[in-house]
């Protein structure tokens, strides 16, 4: 946390004193972003989306600016088929799940580097970059262990920042800067600033944001007799994020480096347990550093080498009568890859190795090495048919050596692309699942890795009238899936213990319909997505004894709309969920609910600066709901904001 407090003033000072000149365009990265038809996440190298055999959703900076979002997890809640389970509002803490996976089954990449925390998936969204630095998001639906290694069971979310997206063939000289702020109910505040300068060979950027709220006071579960615990809890939070990056064109190569920190403190009532004695508060701090050297210019053999590391500190206080629990996790990894095209076949290969560890005053001191290598082939068999085959072998001391092959094919019919494929996936148990030792949760050092076979078929269709339709059916059978089970103690409170399930089967259907139309001087964007999911667990235990296994949505509806008329932008987004199982308990997450958010923005110029005034309404119908246990989510919140860009 001290590192954040030292870095934030330096970055803010840089943003204030940086010389700027007015530009008549938006940010540099907005003009250099890849076309939506080109993706990198599905094959680790730039590829036409219709040739990958995969479903990849792309969200650009324009999409981000038109929605009512204040954090990355709120943005991802719009992505079709991506189920975001938040414990608190405005990105305090969120889990990501896809296609019925647990929150440990989605891989998160930041500029191509794995950012998942080795201790627990609960810290996945403790991001060391603010939302303003994100230029592009690619969501790969379905397993990708054969390309990225363990954890990519349900899918991959790839966050691409503005500085990392800069290409050698694009020159945007000169400095630029912007500041923004929002204020709303419960003393919610959100302030940010960013500065960048782009020269012939070098781009430098810095950004910082602070966000917080007094929250609201809510009634807590009645404590047991004789306890002095408070009968209320506060949903307050405070978060500070800062980052700096540089991209430098060298002779035949590009060097990109980023450092970032994230510091947050918040009320964590019923974030992890539903016990009556829970009055939890939590503080986390993340430090991130990555450096990538990659080929630049036209070459038949593009390559890159990347080194990255992460440190995450967590201080958790269950209640005022219990001691603080301190956990520090670390990850260091080196990865490299190269690609070469031989006629109609492109070969991509790579390897990575690293160390991960945790130092906890409750769960002990542990560390593990891991390594993996992959080879991927893209064969353009005919002008219409493309075959993509990848095989990876990973070594991890928790499960030994595991091969994970996958095969995907795409057939282009012009206005439609048919795709099908599948493969094997693996997920290693994390340190929390193996070693947690508390009165309410117990780990299991003998846990096996999750393994699964997954398959899917789908089609992407370009319809008349600027419509596009995507449909995907999928099925996955998982052996030894990891979950927590409720157990009884002879003396003392019940507790959850991590165990392997015999087998789980997940099947579903993903659909998405989009409209992108120009109406004279106005542009209209509509998107509607529906995901149907069914899951079964081979067990004779009551389903209510499972902590996470069947917490996904059976019916998941997502929608967004934006209308841009040059000076005015109107954006709406909404989500509706109906969970796989109905639990009639006061401490259970809400079985079904829907929320709607909206944003109205007016763009103008004041003294040569591009200025945006906005009004946002979150949870417009004041729906009272929870995603995990009964941790309360924010009610209706009105936000007013302003942004000035130079």
Image (cartoon, helix red, strand yellow):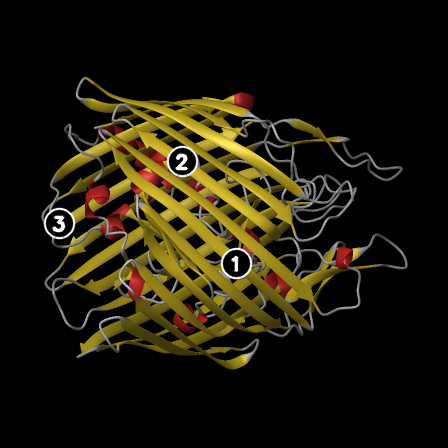
Q: Which residue is mark 1?
A: 509
Q: Is residue 499 above or below residue 328?
A: below
Image quarter for residue 148? bottom left
Image quarter for residue 220? top right
Q: CA distance from mark 2 to mark 1?
A: 23 Å
Where residue 169 sits in the image (x, y, percent)? 11, 54
Where residue 361 sits in the image (x, y, percent)? 64, 56
Badge 2 marks a residue whose secondary structure is strand
Q: CA distance from mark 1 to mark 3?
A: 40 Å
Q: Looking at the figure, which quarter contains the C terminus?
A: top left
Q: Residues within 10 Å of mark 3 (few under 14, many from 20)?
A: few
Return the residue nearer the eye: 533 or 178: 533
Q: Which residue is mark 3?
A: 170
**Sequence order check, earlier mark of 1 and 3:** 3
Q: Which residue is mark 2?
A: 561
The answer to whether residue 40 is visible is: no
Q: Residue at left 30%, top 47%?
A: 464
Return the residue nearer the eye: 242 or 624: 624
């Amino acid at each position: 946390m001290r590192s954040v407090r030292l870095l934030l003033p330096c970055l803010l000072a840089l943003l204030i004193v940086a010389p700027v000149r007015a530009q008549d365009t938006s940010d540099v990265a907005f003009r250099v972003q890849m076309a939506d038809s080109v993706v990198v996440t599905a094959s680790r190298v730039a590829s036409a989306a219709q040739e990958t055999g995969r479903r990849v959703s792309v969200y650009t900076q324009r999409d981000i600016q038109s929605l009512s979002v204040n954090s990355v997890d709120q943005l991802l809640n719009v992505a079709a088929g991506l189920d975001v389970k938040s414990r608190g509002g405005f990105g305090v803490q969120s889990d990501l799940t896809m296609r019925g996976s647990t929150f440990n089954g989605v891989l998160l990449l930041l500029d191509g580097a794995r950012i998942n925390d080795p201790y627990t998936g609960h810290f996945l969204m403790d991001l060391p970059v603010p939302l303003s630095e994100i230029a592009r998001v690619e969501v790969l639906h379905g397993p990708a262990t054969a390309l990225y290694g363990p954890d990519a069971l349900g899918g991959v979310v790839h966050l691409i920042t503005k500085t990392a997206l800069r290409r050698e063939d694009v020159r945007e000289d000169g400095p630029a800067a912007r500041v923004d702020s929002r204020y709303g109910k419960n003393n919610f505040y959100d302030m940010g600033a960013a500065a960048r300068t782009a020269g012939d060979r070098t781009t430098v950027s810095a950004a910082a944001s602070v966000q917080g709220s007094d929250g609201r006071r809510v009634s807590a579960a009645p404590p047991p007799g004789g306890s002095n615990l408070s009968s209320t809890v506060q949903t307050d939070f405070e978060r500070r994020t800062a980052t700096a990056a540089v991209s430098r064109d060298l002779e035949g190569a590009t060097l990109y480096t980023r450092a970032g920190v994230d510091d947050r403190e918040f009320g964590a009532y019923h974030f992890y347990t539903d016990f009556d004695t829970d009055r939890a508060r939590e503080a986390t701090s993340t430090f991130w550093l990555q450096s990538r050297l990659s080929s630049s210019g036209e070459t038949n053999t593009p390559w890159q080498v990347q080194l990255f590391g992460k440190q995450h500190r967590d201080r958790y206080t269950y209640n005022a009568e219990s001691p603080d629990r301190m956990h520090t996790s670390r990850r260091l990894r080196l990865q490299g890859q190269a690609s070469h095209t031989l006629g109609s076949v492109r070969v991509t290969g790579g390897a990575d190795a690293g160390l991960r560890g945790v130092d906890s005053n409750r769960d002990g001191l542990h560390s593990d090495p891991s390594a993996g290598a992959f080879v991927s082939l893209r064969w353009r068999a005919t002008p219409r048919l493309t075959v993509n085959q990848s095989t990876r072998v990973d070594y991890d001391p928790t499960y030994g050596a595991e091969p994970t092959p996958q095969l995907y094919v795409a057939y282009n019919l012009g206005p439609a692309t048919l795709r099908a494929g599948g493969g094997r996936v693996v997920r290693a148990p994390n340190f929390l699942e193996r070693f947690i030792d508390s009165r309410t949760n117990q780990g299991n050092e003998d846990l096996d890795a999750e393994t699964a076979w997954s398959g899917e078929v789908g089609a992407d269709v370009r319809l008349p009238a600027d419509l596009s339709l995507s449909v995907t059916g999928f099925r996955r059978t998982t052996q030894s899936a990891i979950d927590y089970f409720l157990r009884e103690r002879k003396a003392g409170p019940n507790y959850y213990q991590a165990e392997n399930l015999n087998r789980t089967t997940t099947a579903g259907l993903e659909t998405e319909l989009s409209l992108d139309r120009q109406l004279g001087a106005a542009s209209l964007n509509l998107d509607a997505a529906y995901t149907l999911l069914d899951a079964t667990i081979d067990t004779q235990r009551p389903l209510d004894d499972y902590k996470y296994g069947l917490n996904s949505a059976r019916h998941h509806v997502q929608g967004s709309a934006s209308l841009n008329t040059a000076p005015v932008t109107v954006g709406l987004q909404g989500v509706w969920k109906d969970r796989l199982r109905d639990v009639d308990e006061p401490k259970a997450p809400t079985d079904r609910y829907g929320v709607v958010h909206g944003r109205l923005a007016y763009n103008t110029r004041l003294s040569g600066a591009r200025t945006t005034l906005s009004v946002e309404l979150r949870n417009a119908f004041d729906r009272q709901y929870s995603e995990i246990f009964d941790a309360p989510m924010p009610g209706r919140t009105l936000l007013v904001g302003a942004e000035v860009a130079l």
